[in-house]
Amino acid sequence: MTFSISARCRRTGMLGIAVSSSSPCVAARCAHARAGAGVVATQNITDPTLGPKGLDLMASGLSAEEALARLRATASHFDYRQLTLVDRNGRTASHSGAKTLGTYRIKEAANVVAAGNLLKDPDVPERMVESFLRDEDVHLGDRLIGAMRAALAAGGEEGPVHSAGMLLVREVSWPIADLRVDWHEADPIGELAKLWELWQPQMEAYVTRALNPASAPSYGVPGDR
């Protein structure tokens, strides 16, 4: 009931994840990213605690594979979980438990890993990774959105998706993008793309306002003089 892509931009070091599902509010449960640590997607029969735990392990210096091994050794009900990890150096790791639902697959490459369950076509994760790797000069957010659209074009889930989200992090301690479509009857990924189109031109201004308000652009709201 979920497909996702977790990635690192080789050019900038930015980290991000995009995810979609037939269930509501998927990004609130499944998408986890932290600057200086990495990215974790926790999906299928989701345990949301595995995201922060995986990020803590990678922040401590463990690679994605080492962090996954630690989670496998300590987490309960691991056969029900599907996980992907990308560490701050672009190394990847993944797990699909024996009780993962329906048709499921994971595809890994340098700096990127895509995963899905209850898929209409087993090639969906591979098509996502191919899309992501096609143009490394494009902004990470655009590449993640493109990969989600490629997933839909390849068949997506067995049923319709209803929620989607994207999380981007870099050197500051908060997400520079945390975009969510918690429920949409027809096209949550299309709505997510519209949110990204709206947010991307403003994103740097909001980072500047947090770091140094005196040098930030005007706020551009009624009453701002």
Image (cartoon, grey):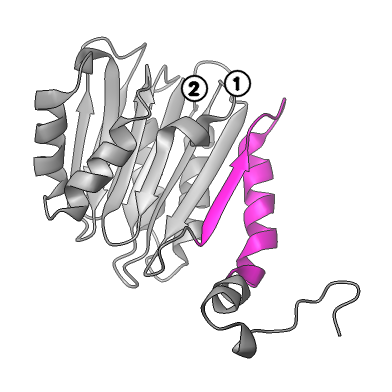
Q: Residue lying farthest right?
A: 223
Q: Are marks 1 and 2 in contact (CB under 8 Å)?
A: yes
Q: Is residue 105 left or right of residue 212?
A: left
Whether residue 107 is visible, yes or no, is yes
Question: Three-letter amino acid code at disc 2?
Answer: Glu
The image quadrant that residue 41 belongs to is top left
Q: Looking at the rendered structure, which numbered label has been put on residue 160?
A: 1
Q: Split into 4 quadrants, where in the image is the C terminus?
A: bottom right
Percent across and percent down for residue 79 are: 21, 14
x 38%, y 29%: residue? 48
Q: Mark 2 falls on what kind of element? A: loop
Point out the stretch of residues depicted in magenta.
176-203
Q: 19 or 148: nearer the eye? A: 19
* Residue 205: x %, y % from top left: 62, 76
Q: Which mark is residue 157?
A: 2
Q: Position of residue 208 (x, y in %)?
A: 56, 79
Residue under the image location 20 percent in, 16 percent down: 76
